[in-house]
Amino acid sequence: MAPPPRPPERRRGKKDPGSRATVAAAPALEAAIGRQVRRFRQRLDVTVAELAKQADLSPGMLSKIENGLTSPSLATLRALSLALNVPVTAFFRSFEEHRDATFVKAGQGLQIERRGTRSGHQYRLLGHSFGKNVAMEPYVVTLTEKSEVFPLFQHAGNELIYLLEGEMDYQHGGATYRLAPGDSLFFDGNAPHGPETLVRLPIRFLSVIAQARGDDS
């Protein structure tokens, strides 16, 4: 009787101590700690074996830590911090940093009210900035036959307009610009600005406003 067929082997990437091995599903915290340990080790230009000896760890264990394959104990982190001459908290820095993103499907986005809303200007907020120093707000603005030419706007910071659809004359600081699809206008928001003539409707344009945090002037 023939032996049953052997199940297919699971191929795993080779884990070379000190190399950047592929980690399929390493927990975020362990992966972040491992990246920091490797970064500090490479900064000192020492090998995995040398750092492992200094921290009283095996090279295999240190390799697992650097690749996010194990959760090191506080005692292990303390030993590594002494060997690398960094505080224990330094291993958690990249985990605590935020790298946020906002994804908005076509036609969606939060519809909000701005000064032009009562004149038929529709604003859909596409996201907002997460930085501490700069506030940024991207909008898709839609003008239809129900929209009116609104009195000029003024606000702190800079603004970028990129026309997606339609055609309009846009005024800024006493000058008028004819915008067609694909045209853009980048300007100082402190100068009076706004649509002057709605040439071809409907009009849709991307408006991105950026200003320093706390600058409401």
Image: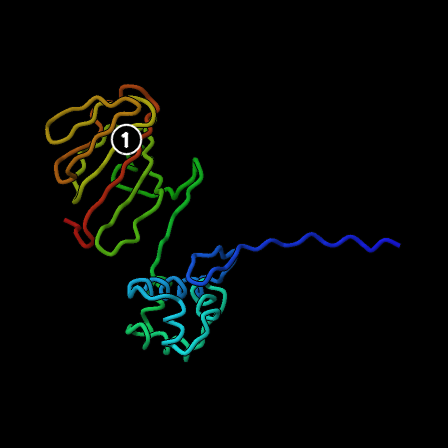
Residue 209: x %, y % from top left:
24, 42
Residue 52: x %, y % from top left:
40, 73
Q: Determine which residue is flagged by label 1.
A: 162
Residue 61: x %, y % from top left:
47, 71
**8 relative to 70 in the view: left or right:** right
**64 relative to 200 in the view: left or right:** right
Above or below residue 27? Residue 56 is: below
Quick one: which residue is furthest to the top in this view? 199
**Along the line of sight, the residue nearer the viewer: 184 or 168:** 184
Which of the 4 quarters of the picture holds residue 164? top left
Which residue is drawn at the image coordinates 17% and 35% (left, top)? 187
Which residue is drawn at the image coordinates 38% and 61% (left, top)? 35
10 Å neighbourhood of mark 1: few (<14), some, or many (≥20)? some
Quick one: which residue is furthest to the right in this view? 1
Which residue is drawn at the image coordinates 38% and 49% (left, top)? 101
Structure colour scheme: rainbow
How many labels sit on residues?
Answer: 1
**179 relative to 92 in the view: left or right:** left
**172 relative to 55 in the view: left or right:** left
Query: Which quarter of the rendered picture does the N terminus lie within?
Result: bottom right
Which of the 4 quarters of the picture holds residue 186? top left
Which of the 4 quarters of the picture holds residue 59? bottom left
Residue 182: x %, y % from top left:
29, 25
Instruction: Kindly identify the amino acid type of the residue bearing the numbered disc 1.
Output: Tyr
Please tell me whether mark 1 sits on a helix, a strand or a loop. Answer: strand
Which residue is drawn at the image coordinates 21% and 54% (left, top)? 133
Above or below residue 54? Residue 164 is: above
Above or below residue 212? Residue 33 is: below
